[in-house]
Amino acid sequence: MPAENPSEAAIRDWCVEYLARTLDLPGHAIDPETTFARLGLDSANSVFLIVELEDWLGLELTPDLLFEHPTICELAGHLAGRAGR
């Protein structure tokens, strides 16, 4: 079920929690200003992240989104803006 009007902060927090689980790292080790590549996100995990975000936000997203917005902060800002929040 899609999230209802998530804020930029909520999107950022969701991404941090998701990546901490996916990369088996403590949440405090995920810096939202660090690039996805530097965090260790590979292409398969990138696709899974996009799919999970699509489900959570109820938006259609493209796989190249993480290249266009290479940090959690940039991605969250873009997604919150795209949804008109």
Image (cartoon, rainbow, N blue to C red):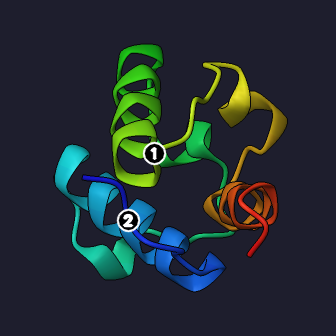
Percent x, y of residue 31? 54, 72
Tell me the number on the disc at residue 34: none
Percent x, y of residue 30? 43, 68
Q: Which residue is mark 1?
A: 58
Tag 2, which secondary structure? loop
Q: Residue at x 33, y 39 (%)?
A: 52
Q: Are marks 2 and 1 in contact (CB under 8 Å)?
A: yes
Q: Residue 16 occupies which quadrant of the picture? A: bottom left
Tell me the number on the disc at residue 3: 2
Q: Residue at x 65, y 21 (%)?
A: 62
Q: Is residue 67 above or below residue 29?
A: above
Q: Residue at x 83, y 34 (%)?
A: 68
Q: Earlier in the sequence, mark 2 or mark 1?
A: 2
Percent x, y of residue 82? 79, 54
What amino acid type is highlighted by mark number 2?
Ala
Q: Residues within 10 Å of mark 2 (few under 14, many from 20)?
A: few
Q: Residue at x 47, y 32 (%)?
A: 50
Number of disc labels: 2
Q: Nearer the viewer, residue 53 or 4?
A: 4
Tell whether 14 sits left or right of 46: left
Tag 1, which secondary structure? loop
Tell whether 21 sits left or right of 30: left
Q: Residues within 10 Å of mark 1 (few under 14, many from 20)?
A: some
Percent x, y of residue 17? 29, 67
What amino acid type is highlighted by mark number 1?
Gly
Quarter of the image containing the C terminus?
Answer: bottom right
Cα distance, mark 2 to mark 1? 7 Å
